[in-house]
Amino acid sequence: MTRNQIFAYASAAIYFAAGIIGFAVTGFTSEHHTKVLILAVNPMHNIVHLVLGAAWLGAAMMPSITRIANVVLGIGLLAAFVLGVSGALGFLNIHSIGEPDNYLHLVYGALSILVGWKLTDTARSVSPN
């Protein structure tokens, strides 16, 4: 398994967890806008997290595309940062430049691009202990 795959599997787990936890707080049909810790959530935002989790899981399972997927998904998160600070993501409960979600998107997007771009895809053996 490559380091890019490990990152993609971890990202899938993080985003699936965010979506599931978000739905536990908001429910599935409400227009309720709320926060989990300091992060804004609503049902549409939760769906976006589940879609990102599915994309990262699919990419992790196909080593030939994992690196590029990490870069592309990172670019998507950087785009979410730009849209968020511009106030264009109100439908996701991200309303302004001061929202912590924006900075999480910035950091995780940059990390994803860095991992996809800089880490080599040398397979690492994982020994069961």
Image (spheres, rainbow, N blue to C red):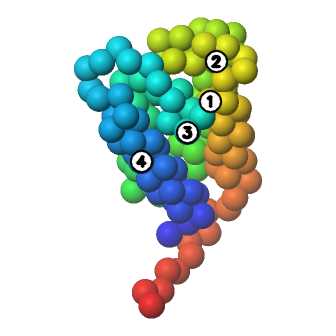
**Mark 1 vs 2: CB contact within 8 A:** yes
In terms of depth relative to the viewer, which is nearer, 36 or 114?
36
Query: What amino acid does circle 1 point to?
Result: Asp
Camera-nearest label, 3 or 2 = 3
Give the SS element for disc 2: helix
Q: CA distance from mark 1 to mark 2?
A: 8 Å
**Mark 3 vs 4: CB contact within 8 A:** no
Q: CA distance from mark 1 to mark 3?
A: 11 Å
Which of disc 3 and disc 1 is earlier in sequence?
3
**Mark 1 vs 4: CB contact within 8 A:** no
Give the SS element for disc 3: loop
- Which residue is denoted by mark 3 in the rendering? 37
Give the SS element for disc 4: helix
Residue 22: x and y in percent read 40, 35
- Which residue is denoted by mark 2 in the rendering? 84
Whether residue 121 is situated above or below residue 124 in the rendered picture: above
Q: CA distance from mark 1 to mark 4?
A: 16 Å
- Which residue is denoted by mark 4 in the rendering? 17
Q: CA distance from mark 3 to mark 4?
A: 14 Å
Which of disc 2 and disc 1 is earlier in sequence?
2
Asked which quadrant contains residue 97, the reply is top right
Which of disc 4 and disc 2 is earlier in sequence?
4
In terms of depth relative to the viewer, which is nearer, 3 or 102?
102
Query: What amino acid does circle 4 point to?
Result: Ala
Residue 110: x and y in percent read 71, 40
Whether residue 83 is situated above or below residue 126 in the rendered picture: above
Residue 12 in view (yes/no): no
